[in-house]
Amino acid sequence: MITWGCQMNVYDSGRMADVLAPLGYQPTDAADGADMIILNTCHIRDKASEKVFSELGRLRVIQEAGATAGRRPILAVAGCVAQAEGAEILARAPFVDIVLGPQTYHRLPEMVARASRAAGAVIETDFPTEDKFDHLPEAAAPQGLTAFLTIQEGCDKFCSFCVVPYTRGAETSRSEATVIAEARRLVAQGSREITLLGQNVNAWHGLDDSGNPSSLGRLARKLAAIPGLDRIRYTTSHPRDMDDDLIRAHADVPQLMPFLHLPVQSGSDRILTAMNRKHTRDDYYRLVDRLRDARPDLALSSDFIVGHPGETEVDFEATMELIRRVEFASAFSFKYSPRPGTPASGAHSQIDEETKDRRLYALQDLLRQQQEAFNLSKEGETIEVLFTHPGRQPGQIGGRTPWLQPVHALGPESLIGHIVSVRIEKGRPNSLVATLNPEFAPA
Ligand code: SAH
Ligand code: SF4
Ligand code: F3S
């Protein structure tokens, strides 16, 4: 399985492995010698989807080598490019056996059976009426100390630039009971941290046991009652769906980590309107203030797009001003990339590449400074770290702070799986260096 794109694709690849396990398939890292190769793709920006056909060229060579050895692997293209391009993939890459969109993964065994009968390629890119989550197996492979759990999919917001409403379909929420049951299973399998996923995760409104729509704040409180679930995160949130109860949950629920990815995209009201984001710059400021009132140590990250059609220097400067005012602990930023079928791609006022490059450079420079300042601000503090893996150097272990900063410390591997108070000795641009504090035993 080769997985590109967002965390939801990572989660989906895991679920595809689960649905294939009863057929005898086991995940492997090497495409060479595999019986099946699944390329799980992303359509979000031009570069992301361009990669697909060059990767397919590489996989074709592996497929042909397998065929010569009498074991031709099945080649499947999944994910958002599969959804968006469908039959076009087979036209350009006829050696592909299966093309399947994100809502059809529960049907994968049947598609494999059809493809094995060599009756031609199989395409499944409809949005099925049945809910895939009702048809995916409950028995899932353990994910380890930190796990992803998709609770919501799709999007009804139709931002001017974005393909997600087209590739993932309409917004849907899984029920509270199925989410809690899956969280319990993950914890029983050893996960101590769960990140709830959705393209619009805070729009989640899954039905509760009485059949009424619930909300993410309520879900967070219920999940926090699961013994052994120490850390809860959720991503990605839309500013519009951040309701009072969810903000209050950040004050009341200690398991809810004080780090929130809350994409704003732009600091210019004119561009926010053109983007169809349905909130203003001041709405965002007010929201950040309320979140920080609820949880004073809350740190924020965001996504930014520079060079959306119509963006002037004044608009760009407004984005820089927003960044200076909010101060982000980390962020992702992108040059606007026209996507087929989205409203902004047809706009007349496209911005030239050179201007986009210049703006992106300036913006990333400022964000980098803020990230480094945030990391440096932790020096000398005692912080709880969930250690998850051996470090790169011998004797080192690695983990994450509540703010998702990577941390390394010298310490025994027996601490992996524990939340340990450490002293932060040094803040680096992308990570922290810590020493173990002997007074604190592992929790
Ligand atoms: N649901 C999330 C975003 C999902 S896409 C939200 O509403 O914020 C992840 C990020 O990719 C977006 O936040 C945006 O910054 C970026 N992105 C999406 N479409 C893009 C495009 N056409 N060009 C450049 N960046 C894009
Ligand atoms: Fe895309 Fe906007 Fe939906 Fe986010 S809210 S997934 S950016 S359309
Ligand atoms: Fe990419 Fe689809 Fe995720 S377009 S970002 S894989 S929802």
Image (cartoon, rainbow, N blue to C red):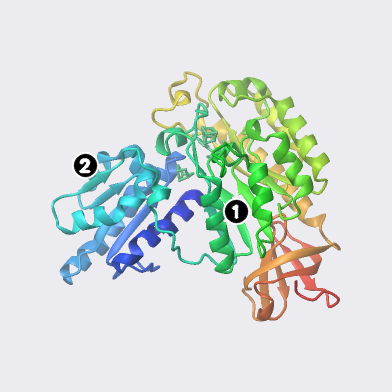
Q: Quadrant of the C terminus?
A: bottom right
Which residue is under mark 2? 91
Q: Quadrant of the N terminus?
A: bottom left
Would residue 40 appear left or right of 189 to someone viewing this image?
left
| Amino acid carrying mark 1 in the image | Thr
Q: Nearer the viewer, residue 333 or 135?
A: 135
| Amino acid carrying mark 2 in the image | Ala
Q: Is residue 113 above or below residue 203?
A: below
Q: Earlier in the sequence, mark 1 or mark 2?
A: 2
Mark 1: is the Cβ under 8 angstroms from ligand 3? no
Q: Is residue 323 above or below residue 412?
A: above
Q: Position of residue 177 (x, y in %)?
A: 54, 50
Which residue is under mark 1? 195
Q: Is residue 432 above or below residue 411?
A: above
For image coordinates 61% across by 35% down, the residue present is 238
Q: Quadrant of residue 287?
A: top right
Whether residue 162 is visible here, answered yes or no, is yes
Q: Nearer the viewer, residue 157 or 300?
A: 157
At numbered mark 1, what does the secondary structure look like: helix, strand or loop?
strand
